[in-house]
Amino acid sequence: MLPDDVYKTIEKAGEGIYSEKRSKFLAFAIPVTTASEVKEQVEAYQKKYYDARHVCYAYRLGEKGEQFRANDNGEPSGTAGKPILGQIDSRELTNVLVVVVRYFGGIKLGTSGLIVAYRLAAAEALDATEHVQKTINGEITLRFPYHLLNDVLRVVKEEEPKVVEQIFDNDCLMRLSIRLSLLPRLVQRYEKLVISSKGELEIEI
């Protein structure tokens, strides 16, 4: 079980192939982060494999995996997209698209045969990728006069958030990103600085 502020995904594409009764299933696992990326990738595979009988796919998106879809592309309902999605979910992955291209070999596989074929093809592609864990981060924005810069940077050095944006002038700005579970402690430290600076430091979360 993953912590609430961690998710698993892939960083590079992977490929797999499965054959059954002369039908060939070409599978591709692709990292994606948006529905528009999914659309582009699916259309690219449909164009590349225009002569294939079916180009089926499934995806799961979002750090919490909240957005998903399974598409059978003409195969009997539930025999292609659903088993592909099942392989994504069994590995607890998100921000992943799996496309499986089927070249029909002339012999029908039946419902159970199709489910097995699409499942195993998807598994081949996903197992050919490296699965990585990423943290779900939160952000905090600080606005403060220049004379507070050293105090602000001391906390950055000790808590080690990622600096997303920084402007150092008479009026300074820093936007910081940190793992969600560590954000409350970072906020708490800057809230103490708000008090000691008599409100000269402003925080936005």
Image: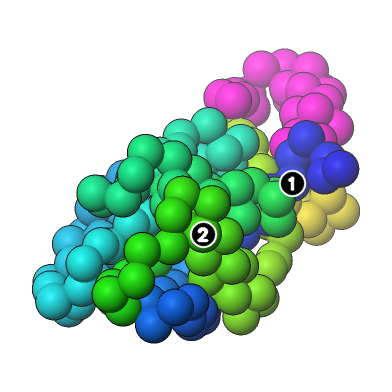
Residue at the spot 21% in from the left edge and 67% down from the top edge: 53
Quarter occupied by residue 37: bottom left
Please tell me which residue is depicted at 43% across the width and 62% down the height of the picture.
109
Mark 1–mark 2 CB contact (< 8 Å): no
Amino acid carrying label 1: it is Val
- Mark 2 secondary-structure assignment: helix
Q: Is residue 166 above or below residue 102?
A: above
Residue 2, position as x, y percentages in the image: 82, 44
Where's residue 174, x and y in %? 55, 45
Mark seen at residue 6: 1
Residue 31 x, y percent position in the rendering: 46, 64
Which residues are drawn in magenta? 179-205
Q: In the structure shown, which secondary structural element does the residue marked by tag 1 occupy?
A: strand
**Which residue is label 2 attached to?**
113
Looking at the image, the residue that sits furthest to the front is: 107
Which badge, 1 or 2, comes first in the chain's sequence?
1
- In this rendering, the answer to whether 85 lies above or below 127 is above
- Residue type pointed to by label 2: Gly
